[in-house]
Image (spheres, rainbow, N blue to C red):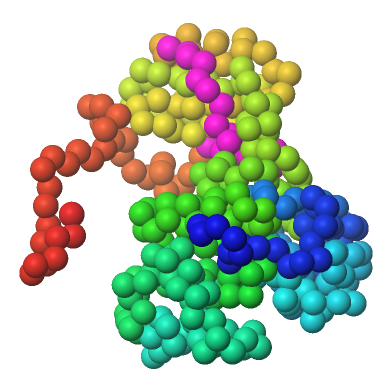
């Protein structure tokens, strides 16, 4: 990013370290609770993951923080502004990129940017330097004349991000920006978000993908509209130290071993993993039962590092049972190794375009 005033500069009235404060916040739709008594703070210069299963209230919370929805009870402030009483100021202080950002596909990249500047009350003709900086930041400068409808999924997300940054918000809210984006473009999004937080912007990244959540500085974990965890992802994972194990060399007994493991009082979750079975023990449980199972089926029991996914499932009360009517009707697959697919020197071309 260039020195001096940048696209991530906060509004002049930004003070303190806290960008967002949520107090006893609830939202109901027709009597059905979408959010229940949330209390949290989000800091400037921090990438906060808003994490949880689909339908757990992530988008509802984002819309409240941008002033698009009114809470049923409780309060929230963003950059010092109340989301209800200071609605106009909230729209200036926040940048919001929803799941399906409203790009005009029959307009070019530059035409979309000019339009969003005008919708923000900005004189598009007087912000050539800002447009150039945004295009450079998002690496869209070579594509200013391309129609938005002709962009790849990742490039559309970058254009949406450029539009969300148009008014230099103090708080940027991204609703599942990694959905439908290729790995390279997703890495570009992470690079851009990291640059923004390095310069002091508060960024909220909503996701149901746990690998994305694990990369955040801190996470707010929602489940059924309630806040189940607020803190660094590493601290949540650390709760499972000495509780993750793998049963190896179980042959074609993987399904049966998994089902039997999940019936043990000491096991909270388990999953088939390659040629073995991975299990997570409940808090304060010993290894006696799982060791006995390993001896009974002739498997080797090995301690493995805890994963954020394990901690997430454990926090939600464990995974589903280990039986499946569909799986029971299928024959076991004989695995020669843990490698499912192997490619060597693979190339595919479409005309003069090399896809891989």
- Picture coordinates of residue 274 (x, y %)? 36, 31
107, above or below 76, in the image: below
Quadrant hosting residue 25: bottom right
10, above or below 277, in the image: below
Residue drawn where x is 55% and y is 11% of the image: 291
181 lies left or right of 114: left
Residue drawn where x is 67% and y is 53% of the image: 200
On the question of residue 193 being in view, the answer is no
- Picture coordinates of residue 1 (x, y %)? 50, 57
198 vs 250, nearest the viewer: 198
Numbered label tally = 0
Residue drawn where x is 37% and y is 53% of the image: 183
Quadrant hosting residue 266: top right
- Picture coordinates of residue 319 (x, y %)? 60, 40
Q: Which stretch is magenta?
A: 300-322
59 lies left or right of 26: left
On the question of residue 195 being in view, the answer is yes
111, above or below 275, in the image: below
76 lies left or right of 147: right
> Which residue appears farthest toward the front when viewing the image?
4
127 vs 173, nearest the viewer: 127
334 vs 153, nearest the viewer: 153
Q: Quadrant of the C terminus?
A: bottom left
- Asked if residue 302 is among those painted magenta in the image, a careful observer would answer yes
86, above or below 259, in the image: below
- Picture coordinates of residue 82 (x, y %)? 87, 70
- Asked if residue 158 is among those painted magenta in the image, a careful observer would answer no
Residue drawn where x is 55% and y is 43% of the image: 215
């Amino acid at each position: 990013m260039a020195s001096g005033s940048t696209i991530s500069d906060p509004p002049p009235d930004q003070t303190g370290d806290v960008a967002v404060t949520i107090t006893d916040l609830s939202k109901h739709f027709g009597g059905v609770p979408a959010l229940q008594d949330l209390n949290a703070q989000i800091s400037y210069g921090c990438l906060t993951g808003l994490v949880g299963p689909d339908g757990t209230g992530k988008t509802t919370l984002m819309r409240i923080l941008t002033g698009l929805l009114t809470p049923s009870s409780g309060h929230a402030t963003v950059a010092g502004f109340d989301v209800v009483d200071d609605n106009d100021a909230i729209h200036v202080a926040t940048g919001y990129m929803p799941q399906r950002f409203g790009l005009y596909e029959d307009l070019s990249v530059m035409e979309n940017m000019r339009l969003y500047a005008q919708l923000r009350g900005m004189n598009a003709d007087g912000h050539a330097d800002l447009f150039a900086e945004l295009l450079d930041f998002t690496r869209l400068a070579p594509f200013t004349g391309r129609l938005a409808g002709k962009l790849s999924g990742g490039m559309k997300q970058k254009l949406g991000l450029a539009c969300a940054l148009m008014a230099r918000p103090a708080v940027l809210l991204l609703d599942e920006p990694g959905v439908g984006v290729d790995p390279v473009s997703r890495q570009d999004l992470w690079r851009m978000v990291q640059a923004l937080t390095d310069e002091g912007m508060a960024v909220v990244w909503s996701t149901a993908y746990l690998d994305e959540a694990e990369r955040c500085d801190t996470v707010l974990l929602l489940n059924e509209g309630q806040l189940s965890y607020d803190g660094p992802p590493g601290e949540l994972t650390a709760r499972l130290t000495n509780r993750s194990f793998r049963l190896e060399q179980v042959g074609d007994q993987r399904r049966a071993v998994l089902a039997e493991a999940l019936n043990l009082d000491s096991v909270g979750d388990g999953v088939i993993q390659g040629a073995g079975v991975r299990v997570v023990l409940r808090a304060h449980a010993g290894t006696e039962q799982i060791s006995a199972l390993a001896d009974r089926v002739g498997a080797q029991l090995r301690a493995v590092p805890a994963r954020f996914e394990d901690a997430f499932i454990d926090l939600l009360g464990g995974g589903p049972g280990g039986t499946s009517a569909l799986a029971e009707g299928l024959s076991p697959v004989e695995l020669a190794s843990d490698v499912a697919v192997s490619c060597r020197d693979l190339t595919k071309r479409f005309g003069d375009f090399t896809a891989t």
